[in-house]
Structures are given as structure tokens and as C-alpha cells.
């Protein structure tokens, strides 16, 4: 597993959204698509194949891992994904970076409906 | 366990996944198809627009990301090749090897090659057809000077249920005299006549 966050950051926006969604708990593919759609007010609607492509890459980078989901009794077992401790650190690092940028944008009065604090 | 995906949407989506390399499909096609099937059921409950949007997104995304995935593999292989000190070849040889490699890949993965060729053919054909219509209807100017100032007027009698009707000659002259909206007004008349010569009658519709 990579020990240094630098080569993976800054994250692509969609990768960051996936990590943010998983930070709330384990999710399967459908859950991820719907969570991301809901958290971006419908702005980001991921195609399933694209989602799994990203998940496979992030699994290889050690950001997420596959886990066995609960048995819901509705057909074949689903594949759930979980944020690894390394993935959580990367997400936190990206969140801090985004926070710094947001503070700068706020200071320059670039965020509609907000004024500099 | 795998998701069999018996719905037509699931079966069609599986075809789109042919854009992706075989090992990706082996690993994730079942899950991706299952998720798509669920999204499709959702879209059906929303309406036709949502279904069309879902399919458009799926088509574009599969083509784009499937191709990107294959190119990533290719780049990875090329990187290993270029960094192998045991190998060194002039630039033209490398290009030739690249072309041969691409052809071998296409020959090996025929389903992908057919999917790409069919998609390109379909999209190019659809594009050409749409452009032909747009060109004929919207882009090509009428064969008159200042065609954008030409208007066709007609009489309408909504009370009698007649939306479009021709104009009588007196009405035309009244309009010509009493309205100043148009720079000039002309009246046209069309008539059809059938003439027979030998065993083949023909119909003509001259515009006067």
C-alpha cells in the first residue's frame, strides 16, 4: 500500500466524490451512484462502468477495499466498498486542500451569496 | 454469484461494455449491469426523458471510458517497451510495430473491433443524415435575393375551423392598397393539369 499521499493528490473530482461518499459508510455500486447524485444535487450522474473503473483503480492504489455486504436476501451478494485508513487520509488531505481553496475564493468574494468573513 | 440480467436493458448494456477490455468485463460486468438495470427501472418510473438521458450517458461514457481503459493498457505496455534497455529500434520501426500491435489487438478482440466499427458507422451515418436535413431546411438559402425578408401570407377563418386558406383576387388588391407593412405583395396561383400523350399521362402543377 502506498505510504505517501503526494502522488495521488490532487484527486480527480469524481474520485474525491467517491471517497466522500464512502466516508459515510460502506456502499455498493448502486448506493454510490445514488449517493453521489444526491450529494451533488443531481449534477454528477456516474455511469456504472465508469464508476467500477474508478473503483478498480482506487482499489489498486489502496484507497478503497472490497468487503462482504450484509445478506439482504434480494438475489446474488453485492460487492460493497469501504474506505481504507490510507484512503481516509488521502480524502482528508484533499478536503483540506479544497477547504484552503474555498477560503481563498471566499476572501476574493467569488462565492455567490457569501461575503468575506 | 453473478447477476444474470435478463431484462432487455441489461442485455443491451452488456453490449456497451464490449468497449471495455475483457478482464474488466470479467471482473465488473455483472455488477455494472446490475446497477444499470436498477437505474433503468428508476428512469422508467420518471419518464421517457430520463430513459433517453440514461442511455445517452451510458453510450457516451462506455465508449469514452472503455477506450480510455484500453489506451491506458497500451500506454503501460509502450512504457515498458521503451524502458527495456534490451530493445532499441529506429522511430519508423516503432511506429510500424505500434500499427502491427494495434491490428493484432483488433484481430484478437473482434467483438470490440466490431462494436467500434459499428458505432462509428452508425454515428457517422446519423450525423450525415442530420446534416443533410439541416442543410436543406435551415442552412441553404432560398434561391431569391434577401430571402430572409420573404414571407408567405394566407387567410385564416378560425370561426369556420379553417386555419389556412387561399386569398381571393379582390382581397389581395385590398391588402395591396390598404396595408403598408410589406414593401411589395404578389399573388400566386397553382393549378394541376393532366395531359396524355400515348399511353403515359403526366401531371404538372405550374405555379403562376
Image: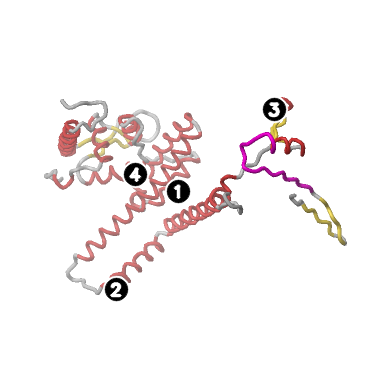
Name the residue beneath numbered marker 3.
B158
**Front residue (pair B142, B55):** B142
**Residue contact between numbered discs 2 and 3, judged by CB atoms under 8 Å:** no
Q: Is A116 contained in the magenta span?
A: no
Q: Is residue B74 above or below residue A2?
A: below
Residue at x 72% of width, y 31% of height: B162
**Residue contact between numbered discs 3 and 1, judged by CB atoms under 8 Å:** no
Q: Is residue A93 above or below residue B77?
A: above
| Disc 2: host chain | B
In whole angstroms, how far apart are the C-alphas of marks 2 and 3? Answer: 75 Å
Sooner in the amino-acid sequence: mark 2 or mark 3: 2
Q: Picture coordinates of residue B167 (x, y %)? A: 74, 37
Q: Both on one chain, marks 3 and 1?
A: yes
Residue at x 36% of width, y 53% of height: B67
**Front residue (pair A34, B189):** B189
- Color style of the picture: secondary structure
Please, what secondary structure does the residue beneath circle 1 have? helix
| Disc 3: host chain | B
Amino acid at each position: 500500500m502506498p505510504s505517501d499521499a503526494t502522488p495521488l493528490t490532487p484527486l480527480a473530482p469524481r474520485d474525491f466524490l467517491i471517497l466522500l461518499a464512502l466516508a459515510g459508510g460502506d456502499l455498493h455500486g448502486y448506493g454510490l451512484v445514488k449517493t453521489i447524485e444526491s450529494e451533488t444535487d443531481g449534477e454528477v450522474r456516474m455511469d456504472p462502468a465508469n464508476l467500477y473503473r474508478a473503483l478498480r483503480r482506487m482499489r489498486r492504489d489502496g484507497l478503497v477495499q472490497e468487503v462482504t455486504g450484509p445478506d439482504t436476501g434480494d438475489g446474488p451478494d453485492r460487492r460493497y466498498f469501504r474506505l481504507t485508513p490510507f484512503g481516509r487520509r488521502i480524502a482528508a488531505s484533499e478536503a483540506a486542500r479544497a477547504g484552503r481553496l474555498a477560503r481563498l475564493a471566499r476572501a476574493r468574494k467569488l462565492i455567490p451569496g457569501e461575503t468575506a468573513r | 454469484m453473478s447477476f444474470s440480467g435478463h431484462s432487455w436493458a441489461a442485455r443491451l448494456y452488456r453490449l456497451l461494455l464490449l468497449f471495455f477490455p475483457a478482464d474488466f468485463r470479467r471482473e465488473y460486468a455483472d455488477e455494472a449491469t446490475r446497477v444499470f438495470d436498477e437505474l433503468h427501472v428508476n428512469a422508467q418510473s420518471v419518464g421517457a426523458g430520463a430513459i433517453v438521458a440514461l442511455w445517452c450517458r451510458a453510450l457516451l461514457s462506455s465508449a469514452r471510458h472503455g477506450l480510455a481503459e484500453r489506451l491506458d493498457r497500451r500506454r503501460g505496455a509502450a512504457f515498458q517497451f521503451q524502458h527495456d534497455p534490451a530493445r532499441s529500434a529506429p522511430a519508423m520501426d516503432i511506429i510500424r510495430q505500434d500499427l502491427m500491435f494495434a491490428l493484432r489487438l483488433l484481430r484478437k478482440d473482434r467483438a470490440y473491433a466490431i462494436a467500434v466499427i459499428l458505432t462509428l458507422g452508425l454515428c457517422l451515418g446519423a450525423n450525415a443524415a442530420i446534416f443533410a436535413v439541416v442543410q436543406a431546411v435551415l442552412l441553404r438559402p432560398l434561391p431569391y435575393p434577401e430571402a430572409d425578408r420573404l414571407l408567405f401570407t394566407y387567410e385564416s377563418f378560425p370561426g369556420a375551423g379553417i386555419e389556412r386558406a387561399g386569398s381571393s383576387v379582390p382581397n389581395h388588391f385590398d391588402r395591396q392598397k390598404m396595408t403598408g407593412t410589406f414593401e411589395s405583395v404578389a399573388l400566386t396561383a397553382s393549378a394541376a393539369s393532366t395531359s396524355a400523350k400515348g399511353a403515359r399521362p403526366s401531371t404538372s402543377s405550374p405555379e403562376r
